[in-house]
Image: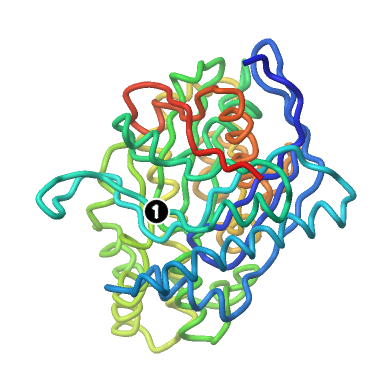
């Protein structure tokens, strides 16, 4: 299929389950890589009742099919409303929508169930609701194709990272800090087959859980609470012994590894060492920072060939956490990294993942692969997603 310029809305709601990001992107074919222009982006918080429903579904050991069906449709309604509000407020018209959906379950490695071993995943959000409301086709359900090609179904943002940020002379690391933190490392002059990408571990997920439990706040805004605390060194050292952090890429993580139960265990450990709740937030923030830095040092730095330096570009909600960013700067700058938020490179921190699913939808529409096998572990490039027509 001959590629054409399209205006695409990308939708993302991440593992923090705090809301929806929409990015409207104009995508044009180019001789080497697609050319992207961000037209608009908006963020929409989940209503309290919808967030409760999402978190309950994520954490439920069992749940009724009725609840799952209702949640699937309710998320579709929320996604459609978010796109409609974005295109209306910015007076733009879209040709296509790409929706990641809300991950309720992600099992990237085979486990036995009902007599067979297999990997599986599920992102909720009824695509037909979005297509009917917006009046254009919707691409969704991006992960299964990669998993059926032997990959882990994630990370899927590295294609955008490579298209936008690959540089002939400087290494680039794209660090997203959402509920889970993930990075894409692109050595100077690298081809897409040399990209390194994986989930480093918890991003905001554990920090948010402790802020909610200890301070009745949805998050530690700007890292202000953690800034008043002390890092509990022995607690942090024990947390860093979690087997996940020793896994070699490709690797993916979610609430299954760092959700409610993990946060509760970390909190109990903190409370045995300190009566100050601020210390628990400081320790959780340090855990995110330390696992990011260790991941870079162990798996990326040897490949970066950083004679001209490395741009370490941070996006996601964690880029707004000043305490976390200060911890990262303190540890990464001595390694030759120049730390910056992604807006310094023309892409607002909150828009990046949504823009990635706009690009992936454009790729799918034109019958082009969207995964980066070097990042996901897939055996080959594959076309991602399913198309739902209006």
Q: Residue furthest bottom?
A: 275
Q: Position of residue 16 (x, y in %)?
A: 51, 64
Residue 152 image-quadrant placement: top left
The answer to whether residue 293 is above or below residue 377 is below
Residue under the point 44% across and 48% down? 292
**Residue 388 percent coordinates (x, y):** 57, 43
Frontmost residue, 68 versus 123: 68
Where residue 108 sits: x, y (%)?
Answer: 30, 45
Identify the residue position indicated by label 1 in the image.
Answer: 122
Q: Is residue 104 above or below residue 390?
A: below
**Image point 69% across, 39% down: which residue?**
96
Q: From this viewpoint, which residue is outermost toward the left?
A: 115
Q: Residue, x 32% and y 23% (percent of image)?
A: 379
Q: Which residue extends farthest right? A: 91
Q: Quadrant of residue 340?
A: top right
Residue 352 as seen in the image, left or right of residue 306: right
Q: Residue shown at 51%/29% (left/top)? A: 370
Inspect this view and state whether residue 96 appears.
Answer: yes
In-front residue for pair 212/295: 212
Q: Residues within 10 Å of mark 1 (few under 14, many from 20)?
A: some
Q: Does 197 appear above or below 303? A: below
Q: Is 96 situated above or below 30?
A: below
Coloring basis for residues: rainbow
């Amino acid at each position: 299929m001959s590629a054409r310029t399209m205006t695409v809305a990308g939708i993302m709601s991440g593992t923090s389950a705090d809301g929806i990001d929409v990015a409207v992107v104009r995508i044009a074919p180019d001789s080497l890589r697609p050319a992207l222009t961000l037209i608009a982006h908006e963020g929409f918080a989940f209503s309290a009742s919808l967030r409760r429903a999402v978190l309950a579904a994520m954490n439920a050991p069992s749940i009724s099919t009725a609840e799952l069906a209702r949640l699937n449709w309710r998320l579709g309604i929320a996604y459609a409303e978010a796109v409609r509000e974005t295109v209306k407020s910015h007076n733009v018209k879209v040709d296509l929508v790409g929706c990641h959906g809300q991950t309720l379950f992600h099992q990237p490695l085979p486990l036995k169930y009902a007599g067979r071993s297999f990997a599986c995943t599920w992102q909720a959000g009824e695509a037909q609701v979005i297509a009917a409301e917006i009046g254009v086709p919707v691409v969704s359900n991006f992960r299964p194709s990669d998993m059926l090609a032997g990959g882990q179904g994630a990370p899927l943002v590295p294609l955008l990272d490579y298209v936008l940020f690959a540089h002939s002379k400087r290494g680039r690391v794209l660090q997203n800090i959402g509920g889970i933190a993930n990075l894409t490392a692109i050595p100077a002059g690298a081809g897409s087959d040399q990209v390194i990408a994986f989930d480093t571990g918890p991003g905001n997920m554990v920090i948010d859980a402790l802020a909610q439990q200890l301070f009745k706040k949805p998050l530690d805004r700007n890292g202000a609470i953690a800034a008043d605390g002390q890092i509990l060194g022995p607690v942090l050292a024990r947390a860093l012994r979690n087997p996940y952090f020793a896994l070699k890429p490709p690797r993916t993580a979610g609430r299954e590894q760092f959700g409610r139960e993990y946060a509760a265990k970390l909190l109990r450990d903190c409370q045995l060492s300190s009566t100050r709740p601020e210390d628990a937030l400081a320790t959780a923030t340090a855990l995110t920072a330390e696992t990011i830095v260790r991941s870079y040092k162990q798996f990326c730095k040897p490949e970066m060939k950083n004679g001209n330096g490395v741009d370490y570009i941070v996006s996601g909600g964690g880029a707004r956490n000043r305490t976390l960013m200060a911890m990262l700067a303190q540890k990464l700058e001595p390694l030759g990294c120049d730390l910056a938020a992604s807006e310094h490179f023309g892409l607002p921190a909150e828009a990046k993942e949504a823009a990635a699913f706009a690009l992936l939808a454009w790729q799918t529409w034109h019958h082009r692969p969207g995964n980066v096998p070097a990042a996901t572990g897939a055996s080959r490039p594959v076309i991602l997603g399913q198309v739902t027509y209006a």
